[in-house]
Amino acid sequence: MSRLLVIESSPRTADSFSRKLTRTAVDLALSADPNLQIVRRDLAAEPIPHLSEATIVAMRTPRPHLTEAQRAALDLSDFLTDEVLGADRLLVGAPMHNFGVPSALKAYIDHIARAGLTFSYSAEGRPQGLLTGKSALILTSAGGVYSEGHAASLDFVSPYLRSVFGVLGVATEFIHIEGVAFGPDAAAAAVAQAETALAKSGWAGALAA
């Protein structure tokens, strides 16, 4: 049975464009594979704390030398990392906040980017992903248009997520909802365009393959 990890990062609920698209994506995935196991990680409903000094020190301590306090400091990070390791594919909702990802998503990534668990270093010191074979569909939303044109240089969402998941060894695919701040008609058209792109992507069928 395949397992899909759905990561929501928008603090908005009913009015969230990224959440609307993730719901559509999940429905498509389940229609392709009714037995698909869905694991949900809602970073707004269950906020992930930013890394503390204790957690950072524990991450850098060899496991045989961890104290009980350090093991406790790693409990959440270990759980989140195991959740990612156990997933076959990832579905990430990532709205743009001030040209970047929501801080909740950044905090989450800081917990799962673990040397020795989700990536390692080569002899030359280069990071090598340990999550090879996994892929992520990343659904972004933005008030303006950033995938092309004069504002493209202000998009720090797609390059960041492509880079960080790439370091972990995860292949990424992006679908964007853009221009939702240009009025109701523009927002509706942006959603429809993204849903069409999602349906044509073949992503859901790949889950069932």
Image (tube, helix red, strand yellow):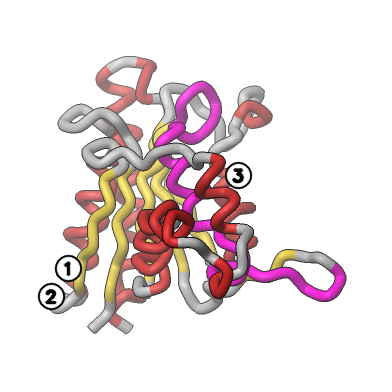
Task: Tell us which disc is closer to us: 2 or 3.
Answer: 3
Task: Give the percent coordinates (x, y) of residue 23.
Answer: 20, 50
Residue visible at 60% across and 44% down in the picture: 160
User: Along the horizontal axis of the image, is 90 left or right of 145?
Assistant: left
Query: Label 2, label 3: how many angstroms apart (C-alpha)?
Result: 33 Å
**Magenta region: which residues?**
96-124
- Which amino acid type is marked by label 1? Leu
Task: Give the percent coordinates (x, y) of residue 112.
Answer: 48, 57
Query: Label 3, label 1: how many angstroms apart (C-alpha)?
Result: 29 Å
- Seen in the picture, residue 5 relative to 130 is either above or below; the reply is above
Q: Around disc 3, counting alpha carbons within 10 Å, would you say few (fewer than 14), some (14 to 19), or many (20 or more)?
A: some
Report if residue 98 lies within the magenta region: yes
Q: Which residue is mark 3?
A: 160
Residue visible at 64% across and 61% down in the picture: 167
Report if residue 101 lies within the magenta region: yes
Front residue of 6 and 199: 6
- Which amino acid type is marked by label 3? Tyr
Query: Label 2, label 1: how many angstroms apart (C-alpha)?
Result: 5 Å
Front residue of 82 and 165: 82
User: Along the horizontal axis of the image, is 170 left or right of 47?
Assistant: right
Residue visible at 32% across and 75% down in the picture: 207
Confirm whether residue 195 shows in the render: yes
Q: Which residue is mark 2?
A: 34
Q: Are marks 2 and 1 in contact (CB under 8 Å)?
A: yes
Q: Which residue is mark 1?
A: 30
> In what element is the residue under mark 3?
helix
